[in-house]
Image: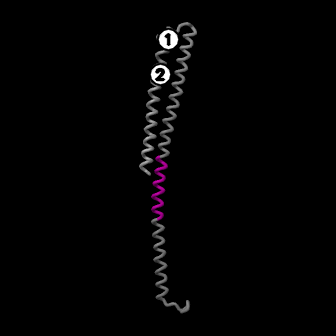
Amino acid sequence: MSEETKHPEEEKSGSDRASKMMDGMLKGLREFGHVAKEMAEEFGKMASDKAEELTKQGKIKLDIHQLGRSRNKAMIELGELVYNLNAGGELAKLAKHENFAELIESIVALDAEIAKKEAQAEAVESEDESEEKSVE
């Protein structure tokens, strides 16, 4: 049979096959699009969670650094106080000096706050590690 003399039935069955094939391709593309969207949403949420966690860790580390600087300043003041009292021959009066008790209390409080922040940092890091293991 030549191509010009095709029967209408053959043309119809050929177009049905093409239509079914096109429908199948469109269905596959829709499913792929749906899966791709879900994966993008999941990865976006993971990235957002990670960014939030890193922000939290960064804030805690910055707090620790600032507390450490405050502690260092108090230690310097304490050292200057001791040095000046010693240079004046008044080191025996150290315990009774008005700034001595304040400086010691400040350093002790800063040490406690630093320890608290370091514990928070460890908790955030261990929380992150446990979440990463659960994702794998």
Q: Which residues are magenta?
A: 32-49
Q: Image height check: is 80 above or below 40?
A: above
The kind of secondary structure element at disc 2 is helix
State the residue position of label 1. Answer: 94
Labels in figure, total: 2
- Decide whether residue 38 is among the magenta residues: yes
* Three-letter amino acid code at the position of disc 2: Ser
Q: Image height check: is 23 above or below 79?
A: below
Q: Image height check: is 136 above or below 27?
A: above
Q: CA distance from mark 1 to mark 2?
A: 16 Å
The x, y position of residue 110, in whole percent, is: 47, 25
Crowding at mark 1 (Cα within 10 Å: few <14, some 14-19, many 20+): some
Colour pattern of the rendering: one colour
- Quadrant of res 83: top right
- Decide whether residue 58 is among the magenta residues: no
State the residue position of label 2. Answer: 106
Nearer to the camera, 13 or 94: 94
* Three-letter amino acid code at the position of disc 1: Leu
Q: Residue at x 49, y 82 (%)?
A: 15
Q: Please, what is the dominant secondary structure of the magenta stretch?
A: helix
